[in-house]
Image: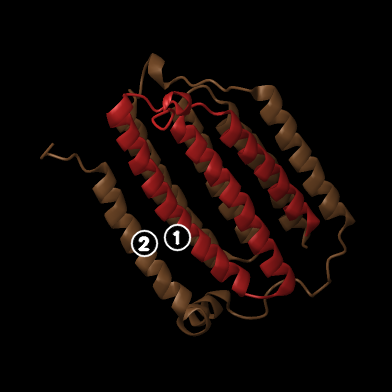
Chain colours: A red, B brown
Amino acid sequence: MSNYLVISAILFGIGTFTVMSRRNAIGILLGIELLLNAVNINFIAFAFQQGNAVGMIFVLFTIAITVAEVALGLAIVILIFRLKKTVQADEVNLLKG
Amino acid sequence: MAEGTQIIFWITAVLLLLSALGVAFLRNLFHSVLALAAVLILTAVLFLTLQAEFVAAVQILLYTGGVITLVVFAIMLTEKLIGERLTQTNRRIAIAGTISLALILFLVYAISQEQFLTFTPGFDFDTTKEIASGFLFEFVIPFEALSLLLLASLIGALVLANEDESE
């Protein structure tokens, strides 16, 4: 049981690192995928431990929401690319006064 | 847990963490996406060791099939697949590394301190059936809300990415 939690915690840490250190906006989205994946592993591990299917139902919800999130995120990335000709997160400073 | 499941778990776990490091550090963005695909498939294997067959299938179909295709399309539209522009660099590695290492250590410490309630692990029922009845009875309102969310995000993505001809 705690093996799964430790794997998930390490995966979450790597995901945090990816989100913080990547310059490319698509790279940051990949990091968010890692974070959500770590959470899903926790849900399934607890569902297995308690013999309760609600954890699995919740994972299906998070998977569907993640797909919506990625679709919208990539649409925004494409929009930014069209405006600024770049997807480097540092160079997108439209709101800077 | 059975002996064979243990072996599969450890092999999968090591490969999973290596692929995750690949997502974080690989120079080529396209290689990063391939590493993410490996992470998602290996997660599905972990789900199989936890008797969650249906969720593993959904994971491979939706995530590895859907998300990876979307991301590759986005890369195709914003960068050249081959060439200099695809290389990406990391920034503030020291700060980000320190914060995420601290996070990992904190989480592992918390997990090692916690006494989890002991149940008999595993499912003594058909999980796919249980998921289906959950969606149709107990969680029917969130399920319908989710379909609304998917429709909204579909339209939103269309509106955002659509090239406006009138301007």
Which chain hosts label 2? Answer: B
The reply to whether dot 2 and dot 1 touch (C-beta < 8 Å) is: yes
In front of the other: B32 or B109 = B109
Query: Is residue A70 shown to the viewer in this render?
Result: yes
Say which of B7 and A43 sits in front: A43
> Where residue B81 appears, x then y in whole percent?
35, 24
- Please count the marks in the image: 2
Query: The disc labelled 2 sits on which kind of residue?
Result: Leu
Toward the viewer: B28 or A32?
A32
Circle number at residue A51: none
User: Is the N terminus of chain A in the top left, top right, bottom left or bottom right quadrant?
Assistant: bottom right
Q: Which residue is mark 2?
A: B150
| Coordinates of residue B130 in the picture (x, y in percent) | 55, 80
Res B34 visible: no
Q: Is residue A60 above or below residue A26?
A: below
Tell me the CA gap for discs 2 and 1.
Answer: 8 Å
Query: Relative to residue B100, is residue B80 depicted above or below?
Result: above
The label number, if any, that marks residue A64 in the structure image: 1
Numbered disc in front, either 2 or 1: 2
